[in-house]
Amino acid sequence: MIKIENLNVNVEEKEILKGINLEVKPGELHVIMGRNGTGKSTLANVLAGKDKYKVTNGTVSFNGENLLDMSPEDRACAGLFLSFQYPVAIPGVNNMYFLKAAVNAVRKSRGEEEIDAVDFLSMIREKLKMVALDESFIHRPVNDGFSGGEKKRNEILQMIALEPKLSILDETDSGLDIDALKIVAKGVNDFRSPERSFILITHYQRILNYMKPDFVHVLMNGKIVKSGTMELAKEVEKKGYSWIEEEVAEVA
């Protein structure tokens, strides 16, 4: 699926990522945890192809292709999806129009016929049920006037509609109450399959009470310094990150 090797990234001449190595295979859910400013969102944004990030070393292979050579649009069409930490509102752009255009862009890139309005509406009604959103939401401007939880659920709706191969969820759980958290987690769980992979970026372990990750990684100072299973996430929740810093210092 995706293989990251020795990835180094600068932002405005400052080195943020300092040799990231990570491989995510089909069907796997990987969690990346860490404090603010450790490079978690930088990694997500680099993979999605956002500008202002300069890759100074390393490679990223996505299904055998050089991801770093692709435009953001080509990455999306190839099956990569990024859920934003702070979803933006797009006043004046109808949510259904936005979703239909995105879905058809992906279908076109695959050589498939575009889906018409009637079939799209039928399809999206089923997807709405997966994230507990009323049909009225797809007739409103994108994220305009949505609550924080509604914005996050709308992001998951976009993911489900686009059917990406790799979904990168950047702090999708931030700012959610427990009910919204459960809905978002269920939407992701219902979408999981042996062909689809996920990278979930988070500060906290609580969303993992409703998901089953295959691997958990801790990012510090631009590097993955520790990897494990769900037990690692529980230990971080219980003890914080200081004990890992001490381990890293001892090795250094």
Image: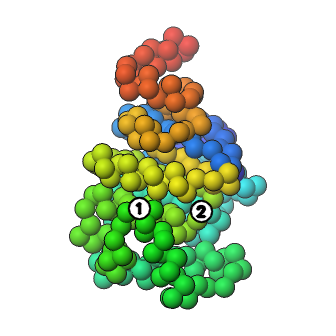
Residue 247 circle label: none
Q: Residues within 10 Å of mark 2 (few under 14, many from 20)?
A: many
Color encoding of the figure: rainbow
* Label disc, if present, on residue 164 of the rendered structure: 2
Query: Which structural element holds mark 1?
Result: loop
Q: Is residue 47 left or right of residue 93?
A: right
Instruction: Give the x, y percent position of residue 92.
Output: 30, 82
Return the residue found at the far right: 64
Name the one closer to the observer, 82 or 8.
Answer: 82
Q: What residue lies at 72% left-to-right and 55% top-to-bottom? A: 63
The answer to whether residue 8 of the structure is visible from this angle is: no
- The picture places residue 163, in percent across and down from the top left corner, at 58, 65
- Return the disc, 2 or 1, that comes first in the chain's sequence: 1
Q: Is residue 113 above or below residue 32?
A: below
Residue drawn at x 37%, y 19% as measured from the top left: 239
Q: CA distance from mark 2 to mark 1?
A: 17 Å
> At which x and y percent is residue 59?
68, 47
Q: How many C-alpha atoms fall within 10 Å of the one at disc 1: few (<14), some, or many (≥20)? A: many
Q: Nearer the viewer, residue 155 or 68?
A: 155
Q: Specify whether 10 is left or right of 37.
A: right
Above or below residue 6? Residue 134 is below
**Is 102 rendered above or below residue 57?**
below
Q: Residue at x 31, y 50 (%)?
A: 179
Q: Which residue is mark 1?
A: 131
Q: Could you tell me the amino acid type at mark 1? A: Val
Q: Secondary structure at mark 2?
A: loop
Residue 181, image x and y in percent?
35, 48
The structure residue drawn at horizontal position 53% and vertical position 55%, both measured from the top left corner, is 190
Question: Is mark 2 in CB contact (under 8 Å) with mark 1?
Answer: no
Q: How many marks?
A: 2
